[in-house]
Amino acid sequence: MKMKTLETTAINRFEDRYRHELKYYIGIVSFGDYQVLSGAFTRAMQVDPHSNEQKQYWIRSLYFDTPENDDYYEKVSGIFRRKKIRLRIYDVDQPDAKIEIKNRVRNLVFKETAILPREDAMELINGNKEVLLKSDDPTLNNVYYYMSKDLYRPVVLVDYEREAYVLPSEYIRITFDKNIRGSGVDFDLFSHAVHMTPAFDEETIVMEVKFKEFLPEWIRSILNIYMGEPHPISKYCFSRIGHFR
């Protein structure tokens, strides 16, 4: 009986960490809609506290995949249960990197996250997965398992600027990702001088809506009016086009 209670608690905690994630594509023709949406969210929500004076911040992610590009093809094939493994930074001069396994089941997302020192992140990029065994962190253990079993290696570096709005009390986050670009040949995560190529047209923006339980009616109304149905957009997949190896 006690064991069943512990198992149930563990399952509930796991489920509690999932969130809904909806994605929308804002192209050149609908760029005016972005301006309307950005203005509305500026008035009704909080600007992410990490933002600069332009209400945005920079993100770089290095994605890993198998030699057969399993994660890429699971995404483009629409497999409901899938994952991505990536390193992420917000400043090339920072002393560490965040490593994530982004799990998705339909529109539900769950991230397993850990921090790697800068030197360990570079070792991992260069193929030394043993640095993941320096701690008993469960995320690092899981990444090590996947990389050992399926031979994950770096495949594309992705940069973009993010404009983000939050409602912390309701666990709601809305983001606009701009100037999305990638490199499939240079994986130097901390470099100031990586040559990138655009993943989308210059004016294209990817909008993401993330929430825990539900969206307020006023947000749903705005999305219905301006955005319609969400789309299965992947910055990772678009950035990989032309960079397969």
Image (cartoon, grey):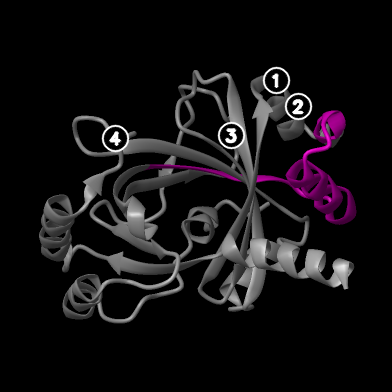
Q: Of 150 and 226, which appears nearest the observer?
A: 226
Question: Could you say which disc has been placed on residue 123 in the image?
Answer: 2
Q: What residue type is labelled 2?
A: Glu
Seen at 14% across and 65% down, the residue is 33
Nearest to N terminus: mark 4 or mark 3:
4
Q: Residue furthest front?
A: 1
Mark 2 or 3: in front is: 2
Report how far apart the C-alphas of labels 4 and 1 lie in the structure. 27 Å
Q: What element carries label 4?
A: loop
101 sits left or right of 46 in the view: right
Residue stretch in magenta? 131-160
Please report whichever mark, 2 or 3, sits nearer to the chain's N-terminal start: 2
Q: Identify residue type, mark 4.
A: Ser
Measured in 3D between alpha carbons, the distance from the residue under mark 2 to the one under mark 3, in whole angstroms, is: 15 Å
Residue 185 x %, y %: 60, 39
Going from N to C along the chain, the mark reached first, 2 or 4, is 4
Relative image position of residue 5 (x, y in whole percent): 79, 69
Residue holding disc 1: 119
Q: Mark 3 points at which residue?
A: 186
**Label 2 crowd (10 A; few <14 / some 14-19 / many >=20):** some
* Marks 1/3: CA–CA distance: 17 Å
